[in-house]
Image (spheres, grey):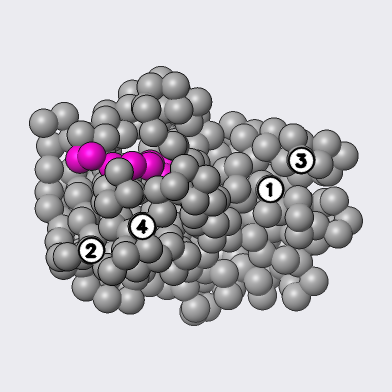
Amino acid sequence: MRDAGIGVFDSGIGGLTVFKALKETLPAGERLVYLGDTARVPYGTKSDETVTRYALEGALFLERRGIKALVIACNTMSAVALPDLQRRLRLPVVGVIGPGAEAACLATRRQIIGVIGTAATIKSGAYARAIATHLPQARVVGRACPLFVPLAEEGWVDNDVARATAALYLRDLAAEGIDTLVLGCTHYPLLAGVIGEAVGPRVTLVDSARATARVVRGRLVERGLLNEGPGPPGGDDFFVTDSSDRFREVGSRFLGGPLERLEQIDIQG
């Protein structure tokens, strides 16, 4: 099992920020298998039942690829479907919300924590619940920032449009007195520069992707599954459920290099 890959599952492209954090945190010997359900993105507008069904279908596809662990690189799936996935799969399953919440609790000084994400993630209250398990007295202020996703995918992360959008979304959060802000959507780390400008230098930004990568490494070490050998022959694998052209273009921008092994598949095949 040590030589098996690690599954990384997102509804689309945003989970590549988690993929990148995993590559930076794990040894070179670890092979990643990424699945983007691009035919049915976004998950954030779907019902809980639909998100859970889609999540199970994608997770089972990756399990059939022989993975040793699964990373749910999607805040919506982590908020809605993680318990079902952990019950159904016979391998470690790590979401992005728990690690991000714990990192925020360690970072906060005044125990006033902001969370930004999709409307579905904020509405779920999943970050507030996760933060309460570590820091019950903390006050959590949530804000949905849906326009950040298309800005990130368009590559508009450091221009006047991005700055104006961040200012409109986040100036109220700064007035709430937060000292820590969780980037509760996998696209948002790409906009960390303009987000940081909008909330000011006294607010610590918490990247759930990096926190998740550290947790995954710890789980692999605990189970004796960490592969510290040489890099995998042929590299990592990428699968999408719809046309791969857009994913290849935007994904290369996210990762800073080409996606060599990218295949369009039927998630139910």
Which type of secondary structure does the marked residue at label 4 adopt?
loop
- The residue positioned 74% from the left and 46% from the top of the image is 141
Question: Which residue position holds label 4?
Answer: 227
Q: Amino acid at mark 1?
A: Glu
Q: Amino acid at mark 2?
A: Pro
Q: Of circles 4 and 1, which is in front?
A: 4
Tag 3 and tag 2, C-beta contact below 8 Å: no
Q: Quadrant of the C terminus?
A: top left
**Separation of disc 3 and disc 2 at Cα?**
37 Å
In magenta segment, residue 66: yes
Q: Of circles 3 and 2, which is in front?
A: 2
Label 1 vs 2, first from the N-terminus: 1
Q: Quadrant of residue 59?
A: top left
Question: Which residue position holds label 1?
Answer: 102
Residue closer to the observer: 231 or 136: 231
Magenta region: 65-73
Label 4 vs 1, first from the N-terminus: 1
**Separation of disc 4 and disc 3 at Cα?**
31 Å
**Separation of disc 4 and disc 2 at Cα?**
10 Å
Tag 4 and tag 1, C-beta contact below 8 Å: no
Label 4 vs 2, first from the N-terminus: 4
Q: Looking at the picture, how far across and down is residue 2, in whole percent?
A: 32, 49
Image side of residue 239 versus residue 206, left or right: left
- The residue positioned 59% from the left and 32% from the top of the image is 124
**Separation of disc 4 and disc 1 at Cα?**
26 Å
